[in-house]
Amino acid sequence: MTKHKDNKTEEQILKAAQKVFQAKGMDGARMQEIADKASINKAMLHYYYRSKQLLFEAVFKKAFALLAPQLNAILNDDSSLENKIKNFTYNYISFIIKHPYLPNFVIQELNRNPNFIEKIKMNVTFPNIDKFKLQVQNEVNAGNINPISAEQLLINILALNIFPFVASPLIKAFTNVDDKTFKTLLEARKKEVSDFIINAIKK
Amino acid sequence: MTKHKDNKTEEQILKAAQKVFQAKGMDGARMQEIADKASINKAMLHYYYRSKQLLFEAVFKKAFALLAPQLNAILNDDSSLENKIKNFTYNYISFIIKHPYLPNFVIQELNRNPNFIEKIKMNVTFPNIDKFKLQVQNEVNAGNINPISAEQLLINILALNIFPFVASPLIKAFTNVDDKTFKTLLEARKKEVSDFIINAIKK
DNA sequence: AATTTTGTTAACCATATGGTTAAACTAAAA
DNA sequence: TTTTAGTTTAACCATATGGTTAACAAAATT
């Protein structure tokens, strides 16, 4: 990367690669399609990124780096649990509505290659649960919320926030709603999800 | 299918195809690997299933047919909402623990080809939300639960039940737990998830 | 202005992959 | 015993695919 003076082409490639990888996954993506979408010769992909694997990793890391810091916020800032959940839910759903491919891409490729997460941990600011854990334990001990482990609560928060984007075709089919209505449902979740969670944990 | 007298080989193939497709997806799967895993010649795959696409569809339909009827139960039986949620959560999570690849496989391949769901609707008993919708509306109108649409409630139920299986590598990394602990967490969810949901909707 | 470095392309290559074919084999029916 | 229909295999085929190379263009450096 640093050896290239002009990063215009490099960015064009990355943008095109993002689209193709996120739509078709590592296995389904074709280098030729990425090159076409970037309006350059296929050899340039290798000139800038060496191999499909490395190009993919660049895309993946960038995607992950978009998702991680927001999660870090909920885990590490100092506001009350209730506030955190409200803010996180609102912001995360707003964000993902703008990048609906992201969660599915990250989850899918992590499933394809689970030990890939180790590589990520080294390159990207990685969320840490410790502080959040203490906070939940304190709230439980103080009797402010129903007993629940921080892990389960975090899983529930992530599930309610992310799942609708990952499983959208399934949900659309089950609930029998069209694309437009589904979007409305997602919009409403910015608020409904935090109400749901807070209701669930409050005594 | 009907023209084949002995379905032993056919089943061997399907079993092997299941493993490979569910582990690697349509794009990542290789016909040769399926043949090897079924201990037969590659030509047999085509003799019995014509093409990779058709073999894949056979596997997918079978997978979907395992997931759908249980969902239908919650949507269409006559017990109380609370009971339904309890039963469904317990049974679904128990079931998926035994088939952890299923949800991810179905969701992933549906994302790859969203209009594939139309084909499924014709071949498999497909869940219908109408009755569940009425039930939720009645409970809300009667003032028994907090206002929520049946669609949002269903999304939440599915999210809390299924997401941990779909996003397991991510969750393991975020919560910093090893495989064994993660299994314990999932076990606990058989009960915790329904408590969480019921708490969230009850006044 | 000459030369070296960086960027870009067309043509090419080796291999993997889904799929086919023709012949051999098996077992049941005639 | 001979047919016949179904089953199985090895060899083969066309194409797609990730990747390379050599020549050339355009900057940058001297």
Image (spheres, coloured by chain):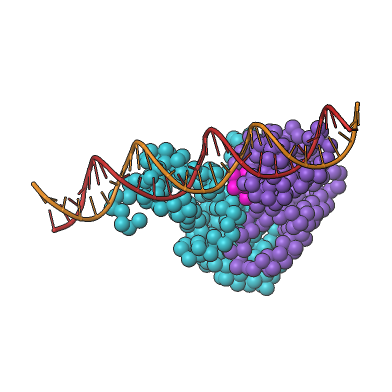
Chain colours: A cyan, B purple, C orange, D red
- Look at the picture and state if A75 lies above or below B48: below
Residue B25 among those drawn in magenta: yes
Question: In the picture provided, is C9 more to the left or to the right than B144?
Answer: left
The image position of residue A65, as x and y in percent, is: 47, 57
Front residue of D4 and B138: D4
Residue A187 magenta: no
Q: Main secondary structure of the magenta part?
A: helix
Which residue shows up at 37% across the image and 40% down it?
A40
Magenta segment: B24-29
Residue A33 higher or lower than B34, as above or below: above
Query: Residue B145 or B12: which is nearer the viewer?
Result: B12
Residue closest to the eye, D3 or A181: D3
Residue B140 seen in the figure: no
- Residue B113 percent across, percent down from the top left: 61, 38
Q: Tell whether A181 sits left or right of B79.
A: left
**Percent x, y of residue B57:** 69, 39
